[in-house]
Amino acid sequence: MANQYVDMDSLKYLLYDIHGFEDVLNQEHFADYDREAVDMFLTSVKDFSDQKLYPTFQDMDKHAARFEDGKIIVPPVVETVMKEGGELGLISACFSFEDGGLQMPLTAMTAAYYIMDAANNHLPGYLGLTQGAAELIVEFGSEELKAKYTPKMLTGDWAGTMCLTEPQAGSSLSDITTSATPSDDGSYKIKGQKIFISGGDHEYVDNVVHLVLARIDGAPAGTKGISLFVVPKNKIQDDASLTSNDVITAGDFQKMGQKGYCTTHLIFGEQDDCQGWLVGEPNQGLKYMFLMMNGARIAVGRGGAGICTAAYYASLEYAKERPQGRRLSAKGTKDVNQEQTLIINHPDVRRMLLLQKAISEGSLSLVTLTSIYADLYQTVTDPEEKEKYYLLLELLTPICKTYPSEDGMRSINNGLQVLGGYGFCSEYILQQYYRDIRIFSIYEGTTGIQSLDLLGRKVAMKGGKALMLLANEMKETMKDASTYDDLKPYAAKLGAKLQLTQDVLGHLSQFAMKGDYERYIADATIFMEFFSKVVISWLWLQMATHSKHALVTANMDYSEEFYNAKIHTMKFYFKYELSRTSSLAEILKDQDVLTIPNEEEVFA
Amino acid sequence: MKILVCVSKAPDTTTKIAFNADGTALNKDGVQYIMNPYDEWYALVRALELKEAAGGSVTIINVGPKENDTVIRKGLAIGADNAVRINSNGGSAMYIAKQIAEYAKGESFDVVITGKETIDENRSEVGAMLAEFLDMPFISYASKMDVAGNTATIDRDIEGGTETVEVDTPFVLSAAKGLAEQRIPNMRGIMMAKRKPLNVVEAVAFDDLVVPVHYELPPAKSAVKLVDPENMDELVRLLHEEAKAL
């Protein structure tokens, strides 16, 4: 295991210096917060992660969650995390004071969870899902449901889950069949099966509160007939004791990664004795779930960013210690009598490490900015500003979910390569990061779904206003960067790519205008890849411009090397990644139609 | 039980230490500060445990400038009831001890606890000097402390073992590893810390008797040499001729 898995300076630099988190803290809603309090909280989370999460990371992979004698067995650290994480405020802090929380900004919590994701990505989900489930109850449930369930969820005494997927209905939730039959007492009898339920059951909490999507008898077909229910594993009796609610755990899915994070198969109402309580209005379940989806998708991107950050530091540490081969002399020869050089001195290894740095810090920048937009959208009062942050949040969320997951994988793939054959061996950690991150491009809507959302909905939102707002933000950065001669060429390059984005969208929109929507979105995933690189380039130019300013004015909170490294990495990203958008644009503008099904048998 | 815990700040253990060009002071550029771990993990936490068991109050005290408030707030977030900062740019151990003593004299503390040392300068001096100024007994390097009534039973680390002593309050104690376990401040504690009193008291005049003249880093470690396990002769030669260990 490497000594380092996260860099707190880079995290704080992005929070305060680049994305102006103090603007969020200055909002009336967050009046009880200041930088000192947030920094102290992040230090607490880092200490907690150092002591409890990181030391158990490899062990959770070796001792995977499993199903035995009708029970899910998870590593004992899950108990520590639920209890101590609950005490630290890692479930409750973002809730309002009235709901038992501390009204903390999402951005601060995102930063905290990023540290935990980097330390041990198998564990934050246990806390995060409990937070998400409680949030649904608080947001949409009755006062009675809130009072009954959320206090123990916020302390970590009880866990929470989201039960959406069924064996026959994954990405297409309109096909779910779990049923809810009204009972005389106002509750519903729930019957059905749910699969891929993360954190669905374990022995370290007294109760698990499932938020279940189901159809009330006679509800309309499709998504319009889906309702949301609280279905606890154990019912609460009048004397506050718990009794079984006929929620049976049928198994645990054995996975290639995140093995310590149990993924369960649950059966509701096998004995016709499973009670559920409606959350909010009938047939509004999917809408409620999706109102919470921005947060969930930011969380997935955050996880991807955390894992690829940890992998970067593991690769970097290895490259700084591993001697292998010799550098070429000016004559192009190698002197075998010379001592071997460290592999970090080989250009190809440096390229891979820089790619890791560029992707991981670029991802963190994107996740941080998206969280800040979420906080500002929630708290600003001026309607114009509110709309601005809403549109920017909506536009960036699918990218925030996708880029750290997809390019995080690429990043770790390169990081594994840095270790050569050892990277493939189980005693080195890179292979675990490589397996763990794989699920993130699938969680909470696959990359394909996110790409459809980006190109099919977000780009065209309000007549393209979201895109225009983002372009304006980019132009501001280009203007600032252009005040420094050595950054001008990069500002110009970004400007050209913004123009290229318009060209690509102009080309694609012809199909939408003709009503050929399938053609319009057929290459949505390629567009996601293309546009993500433009966005991340912008974020790197922000960092480079700020760093340049700090160096020129000698107004430095961090070392000179820190700022120079940011500028260097920006240049690297522009050369090695932004340049790839040209070939992606070529694909997007190509006239050949090769993936839309027609009469032709192409898989012969 | 009324307890005073003396806390100081120290560079984060991950900080790269450097001195200015003439070696007379720490180069503070980019240095992140933390509460001295012996003060935080052992002294403060044991004080809080005693208060939780028997009632009373825990006050933390620091001698330093306003920048130290961040470290003091952390102590309040962990659970101290109130804090005092003696407004000063610091000085020698005797200067620090004098400032704390001047404050503590009028406050009737039952127990005064310091960390066994600060991790940057490793002086281990303040506790003993403070006891002298306050005319109280001093127990150093305490790794266990139980209090019953007015009497404390204390295990202190000695070379190769442990010595157990008894002492009546009031006394001064320096805390070593084992006295308590680190507590991580939670968000509720952090929020409450902002509402707890932090009193700033001006320093009293005191001529420092000891002045640091020069700081120097240890020599850089030389590169590691890897020796083939089959080539023991070479290992012996290197240990003999280069490392001079044989």
Image (cartoon, helix red, strand yellow):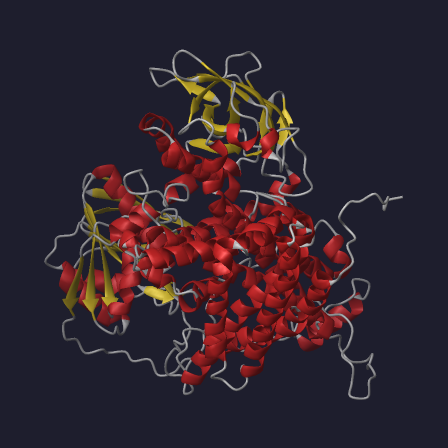
**Image point (37%, 35%), residue name:** A138
Residue A123 vs A274, above or below: the answer is below
Residue B140 appears anywhere in the view: no
Residue A572 vs B79, above or below: the answer is below
Q: Toward the viewer: A396 or A4?
A: A396
- Dividing the picture into quadrants, the one containing residue A549 is bottom left
Residue B92: x and y in percent read: 27, 73
Quadrant of the image containing the C terminus of chain A: top right
Residue A98 appears anywhere in the view: yes
Q: Toward the viewer: A62 or B106?
A: A62
Q: Is residue A421 left or right of residue A286?
A: right
Residue A594: x and y in percent read: 79, 53
**Image point (18%, 50%), residue name:** B170
**Residue at the extreme right:** A604
**Image point (22%, 55%), residue name:** B137
**Image point (62%, 35%), residue name:** A172
**Residue at the extreme front:** A514
Residue A433: x and y in percent read: 64, 51
Residue A471 vs B137, above or below: the answer is below
Quadrant of the image containing the N terminus of chain A: bottom right
- Dividing the picture into quadrants, the one containing residue A510 is bottom right
